[in-house]
Image (spheres, rainbow, N blue to C red):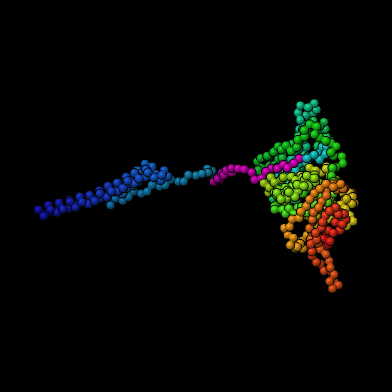
Amino acid sequence: MASKEREKNVFFVGSLVNYAAELKLLLTVFLLLCGVATLLQFLPSRFTISSSDLRFCISRVSLQSPPLSSAPPPLPTPPPPPSSTPLFSNATIKRVFNTYGSAAYNFINMGGYRGGLNTFAIVGLSSKPLHVYGKPTYQCEWIPLQNTTFSSKPITTKGLKYLPDWGYGHVYTVVVVNCTFNGTTVNAANTGGKLVLHASTSGAGDSNFNVTDRIEVLQEAPGSFNASLFLSKPKYDYFYCGSSLYGNLNPQRVREWIAYHVKFFGPSSHFVIHDAGGVHEEVLEVLKPWMELGYVTVQDIRDEERFDGYYHNQFMVVNDCLHRYKFMAKWMFFFDVDEYIYVPPKTTIKTVLDSLSEYDQFTIEQMPMSSKICLSQDYGKTHRYSFASHDSQYSVFILLHLTFCMQHRRRKNGKMKWVLQQVKINLTFIKVQSFNRSLHNFCLK
């Protein structure tokens, strides 16, 4: 009997020991969780957990604390993810396109000029895709100044566009808009006014919108309109419109080029140089004497570099020069500073142009130069030059050296052979025929 009582006591004590171990484990886990919760209060905000999360963790532990014989409850089903776009009955998802910025400008105005008593020209750039794939339109409006005794009603006409760069444009293409007001002389009373261009996309680019930009391109102050400009004798015989100058130009080459062509065209000539970044300090020092003598005008067009066009937008530049100065010269010339005009011996530029007086335009065939025929010993040399007044028909005394690569033929063993040498020509009022005869050797094929 005593033995049975002893066995019951042992079993009871063993059960208490087993339950005490489980209770000790539960208390240890609880204390550990409390310590972690206390530590989390001192961590940055992105590492904190909410009280609901802590209660959820404690409830998970309490669910696992019953005896081993009880099975854990099933996990809850997660909610479906939120939908960012509404679903319609036909399973079509509606998307929204938000617009920012602009791909390219509708019109970039460089200048507006009179072409006569009732006609104007506007020169600028426009988005190339807009003109390739769309049909933008232009309308011209002349608005007289108010507070005058004459009619102050605006007049409008359709603007005709021309694309002179033949498709070479990149992001932008050159656009010349002609505005001709038929049957009337614009600003006939010389009371002033302004020309406004209305440039419309006509649905190109965004078919839901017809964007129209209002651009003031020209303004005439009262009394500034001079109709005799279109009928009087021009100031110059020859006028040069240069393409955009850019890059690291050699000042010695520019010095040779301008001196040669001033001599070639004579005193009744003028040169417009367009600086797109190429007229650096050394080149400007070369041009300054010619600017002071009235032969050269430099125009700073460096802002055009913002707009990606063909060869630094040279088509826009030469068209602007044409419409800006065309009433100031008999003939205008368009070529680059790496090209030289040459006429045959016993002729001058005047005799050539007199023979072409019945034509409005002509072109000169090019003959390429090769740098391989130049002597490398003279590369980088800079020759001195000076200017002084002189009582002659040219009004300018020139003392400088021009360096040309010449081709000469020499007989050897009864055969003609090409040899290359460099000839320096000292220009001190030599005759034009003599100078052209020397240059003629270079142009032989």
Q: Majority secondary structure of the magenta segment?
A: loop
| Rendered residue at 73%/57% (across/down) | 381
Whole-percent x, y for residue 360 in the image = 86, 48
Q: Quadrant of residue 233?
A: top right
Was residue 107 drawn as part of the magenta stretch in this picture? Answer: yes
| Rendered residue at 82%/69% (across/down) | 417
Looking at the image, residue 372 sits to the left or right of residue 57; the answer is right
| Rendered residue at 77%/45% (across/down) | 291
Quadrant position of the C terminus in the picture: bottom right
| Rendered residue at 81%/52% (across/down) | 399
Whole-percent x, y for residue 208 in the image = 65, 41
The answer, for residue 59, to whether it is visible in the render is: no
Looking at the image, residue 88 sits to the left or right of residue 318; the answer is left
Whole-percent x, y for residue 254 in the image = 76, 52
Q: Is residue 142 above or below residue 127?
A: above
- As drawn, which residue projects farthest toward the left? 1
Relative to the observer, which residue lies in front, 154 or 293? 293
Was residue 168 drawn as part of the magenta stretch in this picture? Answer: no
Q: Quadrant of residue 256?
A: bottom right
- As drawn, which residue projects farthest toward the bottom? 413
Relative to the observer, which residue lies in front, 320 or 60? 320
Whole-percent x, y for residue 173 in the image = 72, 47
Give the extent of the magenta segment: 91-112
The answer, for residue 191, to whether it is visible in the render is: yes
Task: Count numbered badges in the picture.
Answer: 0
